[in-house]
Image (cartoon, rainbow, N blue to C red):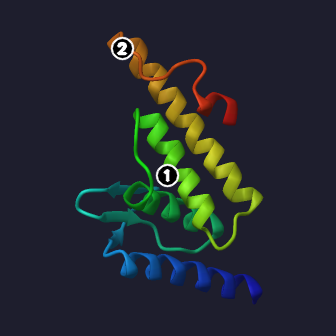
Amino acid sequence: MAFAKLVYEMAGHIADIANANDIEISGHSSGGRAWRRSRRVKIRPIKSAVTYAIAMHEIGHVLGEQRGRRVEKEVQAWDWAKAHAIIWTPRMEQTKRKCLQSYIRWAEHKQARCNRVFIEPHDAIYREC
């Protein structure tokens, strides 16, 4: 029963942040998306600590610092999520790291294809993952 109460609190926290900051929330079939300028996020329903962490991350794209390359923006959104979450579990941390590692792979792949620098080997994200 305690888990159900926590999930209810996490869902309420997301709704409270969205309402207080005029962020439109709509459903998404997997993961999430965020549009900073139009203050919109698409997220899955909050049913676990992981869906809560991803929702907080997407809101972090709207409310948090968003400077630098895409990978850096991902780190900043996760940092915002962790700093503003009502709870941060080991499973949430694992999800954060897994997501960041996927962005590292994306940046490395894009860098190889485009012959442009998308990520530096010394970037903080490498040290974090």
Give the class, few, some or many, for how many residues have Cα within 10 Å of label 2's Cα (few <14, many ≥20).
Answer: few
Q: Which mark is residue 29?
A: none
Question: On the image, numbered disc 2 is attached to which residue?
Answer: 116
Q: Residue at x 37, y 81 (%)?
A: 19
Q: Residue at x 61, y 68 (%)?
A: 85
Q: Is residue 39 above or below residue 61?
A: below
Give the class, few, some or many, for how many residues have Cα within 10 Å of label 1's Cα (few <14, many ≥20).
Answer: many
On the picture, is 111 further left or further right than 93? left
Q: Amino acid at mark 1?
A: Ala
Question: On the image, numbered disc 1 is attached to which residue?
Answer: 77
Element assignment for label 2: loop
Answer yes or no: is residue 129 visible.
no
Counting from the top left corner in percent of width and height, residue 32 is at 42, 57
Decide which of tag 2 and tag 1 comes sooner along the chain.
1
Element assignment for label 1: helix
Give the quadrant of residue 84: bottom right
Q: Do the residues under discs 2 and 1 have CB atoms within 8 angstroms? A: no
Counting from the top left corner in percent of width and height, residue 77 is at 49, 51
Q: Amino acid at mark 2?
A: Arg
